[in-house]
Image (cartoon, helix red, strand yellow):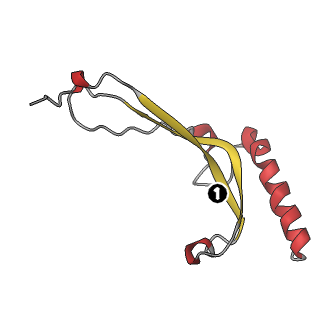
Amino acid sequence: MRSSSPSNFPLIVSSRAPGKIILSGEQFVVLGAPAVAMAVNLYSKIEVRPSPSGRIEVAGDIPLHLVGDADKGSLVGENRELLEPLRLAASATLDHLGTG
């Protein structure tokens, strides 16, 4: 019988996926209808490796510099330009649909 201790699993497995925004139809997707979505240049990353304790441990590495000031409900000032492409895409979509 093989031991399942962490030393038997020396590999580190990692992956990443782009974030996305749904410009229109977010709730439609739940019903199987189409939506307008696009990837953004922010990624979710995961890395799995053996734990010295043998337990499953979960840790997050959230880029807090991209998170807004929750108390004031605003974006961190120096990062506003990161969201400008999203604002432009949403504005163009609304203009095309005649609702902007």
Between 89 and 36, the residue placed more toward the observer is 36
The part of the image, by quadrant, that contains residue 96 is bottom right
Residue linked to disc 1: 73
Image spot of residue 30 (x, y percent): 56, 73
Q: State which quarter of the image contains the C terminus.
A: bottom right
Image spot of residue 13 (x, y percent): 42, 31
Left or right: 57, with 99 as reference point: left
Between 90 and 49, the residue placed more toward the observer is 49
Left or right: 2, with 34 as reference point: left
> For the point 23% across and 21% down, which residue is it?
7
Left or right: 91, with 58 as reference point: right
Q: How many marks?
A: 1
Q: State which quarter of the image contains the N terminus.
A: top left
Q: Secondary structure at mark 1?
A: loop
> For the point 73% across and 40% down, which residue is it?
79
The part of the image, by quadrant, that contains residue 9 is top left
